Image: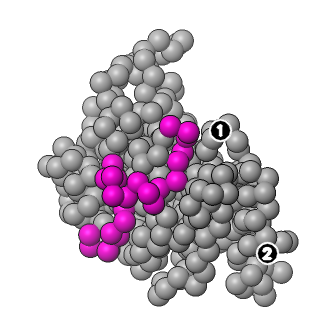
Amino acid sequence: MPHFKQILEDAIRSRAFPGASLVVGDKQFNMIEEAVGHFDYDPQSPAVEIDTIYDVASLTKVVVTTTLAMMLFEEGKLDLDAPIGRFTIRQLLTHSSGLPARPLPLGAAGAKRRVRVAGVDCCLEYELGTETLYSDTGFILLGQIIEHIGGAPLDSLARERIFQPLGMSDTCFNPGPALVSRIPPTAPDIRGRVHDPAAAALGGVAGHAGLFSTARDLARFCRMMLRGGPSIELFTHPTESVPGSSRALGWDTRSDEGSSSGHYFSMKSFGHTGFTGTSMWIDPMRGLYVIFLTNRVYPDPANLQIRDIRPKLHDAIILSLIPATCS
């Protein structure tokens, strides 16, 4: 197994992504901080640094939306199983609501029901609670529900209840002009604006995408999650509501095969990935987190090399830290 630095360097040479930030840590501090490559494939473009700000895409779902849902649950303001229209919060969190992957207009063949999400009529693609289909649509709706219960916009709730208390000073929605120079592009014409089209249509703030952050800021969040507690245990434990699903409440968990976390994270691990080339995995048994941020969508979102790189990278990190336990 190549060393994790070699994997990163090889990935850049193969044009899997222009650059990356990597942080590995435990409950106390960051043990590894690595920044490689550039903002884009022009060698004259800015070099990636450990505090480079990335569009973290669907990490928004767990860092913001799921965390706020957990807080409201703890306060007795959010009942996971109370019906919210045709759904329950649990079904939205576990991607088992029947909603499509994206909020597409009505017209899917065989649809029996419809629902309006973000001003768009959507078809339900399967009977509620019977399957798992990863759904941005469900998290857009969940974000709107949290705004209603929390009495404020999602970005305000996140800033006041998550980012400020944890000292995540470089984490935000809709970064201002002063931050753009620290943000790699996600397309030739997109830099400092959210890459996801649905989040962009919603003004850059949505329950499924829109967050910008750094590896160091996300490490602060991971250390909070490693401290644990009853609600964290509940939200990160695989649900049994849909047989065969690896989904917890908002979070994904390590599956027996094909996990982006690789082979050596424990079965208690939980994490998430983002379309732009981001991922975050947390292992409470090892007391370890790995945050890996890239802009792999630049300039071609069809470039999917990162799917092979993530598990190899995670394996190499674990082997470099604790080889005796992985034999």
Q: In this rendering, does residue 322 appear at all?
A: yes
Q: Residue 76: percent from the left, percent from the top?
A: 20, 59
| Above or below, comparing residue 82 to residue 76 in the picture | above
| Magenta highlight range | 164-189
Q: Residue furthest left?
A: 151
Residue ID for mark 2: 3
- The residue positioned 41% from the left and 54% from the top of the image is 180
- Mark linked to residue 300: 1
**Which image quadrant for residue 317?**
bottom right
| Viewer-proximal residue among 57 and 325 | 57
**Which image quadrant for residue 113?**
top left
Q: Residue 68: percent from the left, percent from the top?
A: 30, 57
| Viewer-proximal residue among 251 and 163 | 163
Query: Counting residues from the N terminus, which is met first, the one under dot 1 or under dot 2?
Result: 2
Task: Kindly state the secondary structure of the residue where label 2 is placed.
Answer: loop
Quadrant into which the C terminus falls: bottom right
Q: Residue 313: percent from the left, percent from the top?
A: 72, 66
Q: Amino acid at mark 2?
A: His
Task: Kindly state the secondary structure of the residue where label 1 is placed.
Answer: loop
Q: Amino acid at mark 1?
A: Asp
| Viewer-proximal residue among 248 and 66 | 66
| Viewer-proximal residue among 179 and 82 | 179
- The residue positioned 66% from the left and 52% from the top of the image is 42
